[in-house]
Amino acid sequence: MASREVLAGGAVVWRAGAGEVEVALVHRPRYDDWSVPKGKLEPLESTRVAAVREVGEETGARVALGRFLARTHYRVGADHKKVEYFAARYLSGELRPSHEVDEMRWLPVSAARAALSYDRDREVLDAFTALPQDLTTVLLVRHAKAGSKSEWDHEDDLRPLSKNGRKQLAPVRVLGTLYGAERVYSAPLVRCVATVQPVADDLGVPIAEEKLLSEKAYPGREETAVDRVAEIASAGGTAVICSQGGVIPDLVARLATRSGLSLGRHLAAKKGSVWALFFDGTRLAAADYLAVP
């Protein structure tokens, strides 16, 4: 029988305990093991969506996704399984026992490490503890595709999203939900505002204008813009910010350099893409790039 690759998503679900962070482990009666919640991707599903869905199915918990932690590879019979894991902050919910998971335990990290059945899960837990757990998330979005500039006869700031651009809104909206978005900001351009309007509508909040994050205002005031993003991050929770391609790579690079974080030389920022930035106070601690189709 030919080997096939099976893709899965999982998460280290955490909450603040009495003096120490606690993480959720699940017991699977089929294997009689204790593991980190995870499960196979459904058709056309991303690993992030799968991780949140599987956490809900296996633990009953509603979570806000955090940073990427690790990727594991192992064999299950003839199949090759690849699992991507993320941090996930517990929000609410209680276990609903099923034939797949009959028990869940909240354990301090040290106890969880000892209770896990597999070394690969311990490696994921080590990745989780490598940084502070309670990081603030900023989703920095490049606006979706807009109509051709050469075919637009009005002020460029008023140029709307194209048909293909409107198709990119759904993935951005999903990411806002996965990461537990609470606040929305945007450069004052029609295409930027329109890109994050569905997120704001879901939350029932206004979009705060950030002129510094437009290509017109950014040059010459780069460090002031970096300070502003750090200020937004320091307010806590999860913020969504929409900006432009002439701003985002340099802004992310400056945030990383200021924090001593290496992200490589070329920082992508395709239209509709998202940088998930994770801050410890005002210091950028981690960053994940998500290219939206």
Image (cartoon, rainbow, N blue to C red):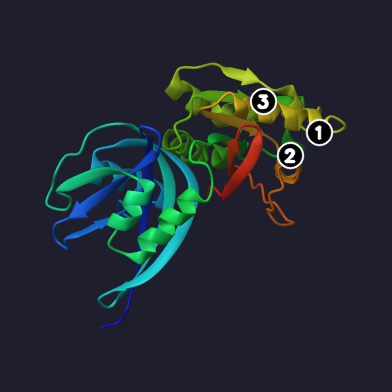
Can you say which quadrant of the picture contains the N terminus?
Answer: bottom left
Determine which of the numbered discs, if any, sits on residue 231 in the image.
3
Q: Which residue is mark 2?
A: 251
For residue 101, side relative to residue 50 (left or right): left
Q: Which mark is residue 268?
A: none
Q: Residues within 10 Å of mark 2 (few under 14, many from 20)?
A: some
Residue lying farthest to the right in this orientation: 220
Residue that mark 1 sits on: 222
In percent of width and height, residue 126 lies at 45, 55
Indicate left or right for 269 with 171 as reference.
Answer: right
Badge 2 amino acid: Leu
For mark 3, give the secondary structure.
helix
Q: Position of residue 140 (x, y in %)?
A: 61, 37
> Is residue 43 or residue 3 the one in the foreground?
3
Alpha carbon separation for disc pair 2 and 3: 14 Å
Q: Residue furthest bottom?
A: 1
Q: Pointer 1: residues within 10 angstroms few (<14), some, or many (20+)?
A: some
Q: Nearer the viewer, residue 167 or 284?
A: 284
